[in-house]
Amino acid sequence: MNKNFKPKITLFHCINTFSDGASLPIAAEVDCELQSVKLPCSSMVKDVFLLRSFESGSDATVVFICPEGECRYVEGNIRAKKRVKRVKDLLDEIGLDGRRLSIFNISSGDEAAAVQNIQKAISDLADLGPNPAV
Amino acid sequence: MIVGEQKPLAEIKKTVAPYKKLLILGCGTCVKTCFAGGEDEVATLTSALRLTLKKDGKEIEIEELTIERQCEDEFIQEAAEAIARNDAVLSLACGAGVQDIARRFDKVPVLPGVNTTFIGVLEKQGLFTEECVGCGDCELATFGGICPIARCSKRLLNGPCGGSKDGKCEIDPDIDCAWQLIIDRLKTLGQLDNLRNYIPPKDWRSSNAGGPRKLVREDHII
Ligand code: SF4
Ligand code: SF4
C-alpha cells in the first residue's frame, strides 16, 4: 500500500454500541480519516446508505452491530447483517470488491474491540487500495 | 400482485450505456412490495450504477423518480416532465408498466430494469410464491381455492399424479404438492365430493395461448 495513502473509513454504528462514534478515542487511535454515522439501531443501515458512503469517498465502510441476542430491538442486528451481506455482493457486481464493507459484533462501549476492528478494515485495504470510484 | 426481480447490474449497465441522461423510474405498487422497483430500489440502483460507471471512468446524469403505478395514465403523467428532460427511461416496473410508459412517450427509449416473473403473493416476509397464471377462466371454486395450474408442477386438473411424498412435489421437494393442499383443504371444507367429477381438458383460448387479450368495459368508455 502506498505510504501516503490515508484511508477514509465510514463507520455506521448503533447508539447502543457507542453514543457517538465520532467522539470515541478510536478516531485518534487509528490511522485513517474516520467518519461516523450513528443510528438508533443498526438495522437502519439501508443498502443505499452503505453505497453512498462509497460515493462520498469511503475506501472502506464498517458496520458495528450489537452481539447476537443483545439487540434492544430483538433482531435489528440480524437484519443489518443480512443487508450488509447483500451489499457486499452488490459491491462485487459494481467492481469495488465486497471486502471493502465489513461488519462486526461489538459489545456496548467496547472501545478496544472497536479499534481492533477498524484496524482490521484498514489492513484489508492493503490489498484493495483506494476506492477506484472516486 | 406482479412479482419481479431486478436485472443484474451488468445487464443494466450495458443497456443504459448509450445514454448521457437517464431517468430511473420506480413503481410504488407491486414491484415495491417485492423489493424490485420502489423508491429504495431506485435509490440503490442509482448509486450502484453511478459507482460502477465512475469506476470505469464514465459518468452519466441519473435522475430518480417513483410514481404510484406505471400502468395507469393518471400516475404516468406525473413523470412526464422528468421523462422529457432525459435521454432514456430505465423502468423498474413490470413489463406492463414498461410498455405503458413506452406507449405514452413514443420518442423516448424505455428500457426494462426488472425481470417480470409471476402473479403471486407475499407468502411470508421475504418469500414470494406464484399463485395464478391468468388463465382467464378461474376454476378455484372446484379446487378449494388452490390453483393446480399455477401450483402443480404438471398442471394436472385431475390429480394427484401419485408421485408426491410427505406432501412435497416429486419434481421439486422444495414445493408443496398442490394436490395434497387441494385435498386437505377440500376435506376441511367438507367438499371432497368436488373431485368425483371429471374435469374436462381446459379451453386455453381464454389464456394468452389464445393471443393477446383485451378487456372492454363499455360502461366506462365515453
Ligand atoms: S406497473 Fe406493474 S408493477 Fe407497477 S403497479 Fe402496475 S402492474 Fe404493478
Ligand atoms: S384457475 Fe386460472 S385464473 Fe384461477 S387462479 Fe388458476 S390460473 Fe388463475
Image (tube, grey):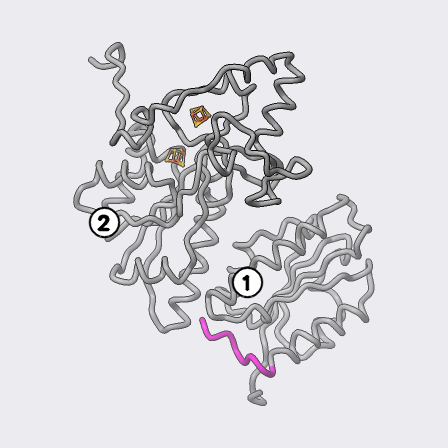
Q: Is residue A25 magenta?
A: no
Name above or below for residue A8 compared with residue A88.
Answer: below
Q: Of helix, strand and loop, which mostly describes the magenta segment?
A: loop
In this orientation, which residue lies closer to the viewer: B179 or B38?
B179
Residue designated by label 1: A89
Give how far apart the Cα atoms at labels 2 and 1 are: 30 Å
Q: Where are the magenta residues, as a range?
A: A126-133
Quadrant of the snapshot with the C terminus of chain B: top left
- Residue furthest to the left: B107
In this orientation, which residue lies closer to the viewer: A109 or B142?
B142
Residue A1 percent location from the top left of the image: 58, 87
Q: Secondary structure at mark 2?
A: loop
Residue A46 percent location from the top left of the image: 58, 51
Residue designated by label 2: B109
Give the image quarter of residue A49.
Answer: bottom right
- Residue furthest to the top: B219
Give the residue drawn at x 35%, y 55%: B62
Give the residue drawn at x 38%, y 27%: B135
Give the image quarter of residue A111.
Answer: bottom right
Subunit ID for the residue under disc 2: B
Residue A134 percent location from the top left of the image: 45, 72
